[in-house]
Image (cartoon, rainbow, N blue to C red):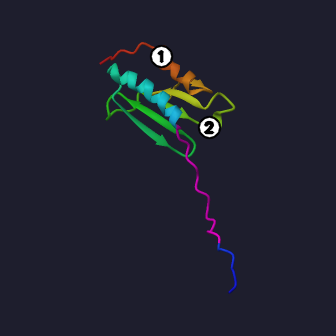
Amino acid sequence: MNAQPPIPFPQGPRIAEQVSFDRRELALILSVYGRMVAAGEWRDYAIAALRDVAVFSIFRRTAETPLYRIEKRPRLRSRQGMYAVLGGDGQVLRRGHELGAALRFFETRQFHVVE
C-alpha cells in the first residue's frame, strides 16, 4: 500500500470579512439603549454587520427612519476614531477612538419627547 498525502481543500475566492460589534461593545451600547427605553424615548433597534462598517440603528418607532446610528469603522482607527454617533440626517454628532467616549453623547443630553 502506498500512503498518499491528503488532497487539500480547494482555495476559492476569499470571502470578505464582516465588521461587527464584539460582546463588550454591545454591552456598552445596550446599557445606554436600555436606559433610554426605560425613559420611554426609544423603542426599537437594528444591527447591521457589513463589510466595512457595523451599524447599530436606534428608532423611536419601528416604521420610522433611525433617530441615531452608532457606527464602527475600523479603517478610521488611526485617523479620527473608529466609533461615531450619527444623527438621523447622517450628521456626525460625536466621534472617538473609544466607544465609551462616543456614547457619552447620550449622557450629556437631556432628551424629551417632542410630538
Report x, y in % for residue 115.
29, 19
User: Residue at the spot x=69%, y=79% of the render?
Assistant: 4
**Which residue is the extreme one toward the bottom?**
1
User: Residue at the spot x=43%, y=33% of the render?
Assistant: 57
What secondary structure is found at the residue carrying circle 1? helix
Residue 94 shows in this picture: no
User: Residue at the spot x=63%, y=65% of the render?
Assistant: 11
**Magenta: main secondary structure:** loop
Numbered circle sitting on residue 107:
1
Dividing the picture into quadrants, the one containing residue 80 is top right
* Above/below status of 22 relative to 43: below
Q: Nearer the viewer, residue 98 or 76?
A: 98
> How dense is the environment of label 1, judged by Cα within 10 Å: few (below 14), some, or many (20 and up)?
few
Q: Earlier in the sequence, mark 2 or mark 1?
A: 2
Residue 38 shows in this picture: yes
Report x, y in % for residue 77.
65, 33
Report x, y in % for residue 95.
58, 25
Numbered circle sitting on residue 16:
none
Residue type, numbered disc 2: Pro
Residue 9 is inside the magenta segment:
yes
What secondary structure is found at the residue carrying circle 2? helix
Mark 2 vs 1: CB contact within 8 A: no
Report x, y in % for residue 10.
62, 69
Number of marks present in the image shown: 2
* Above/below status of 111 relative to 18: above
> How dense is the environment of label 2, judged by Cα within 10 Å: few (below 14), some, or many (20 and up)?
some
Residue range of the region highlighted in magenta in the rendering: 8-22
Q: Nearer the viewer, residue 111 or 9?
A: 9
Residue 108 is inside the magenta segment:
no
Whole-angstrom CA distance, mark 2 to mark 1, is 24 Å
Numbered circle sitting on residue 74:
2
Left or right for 8, reference 115: right
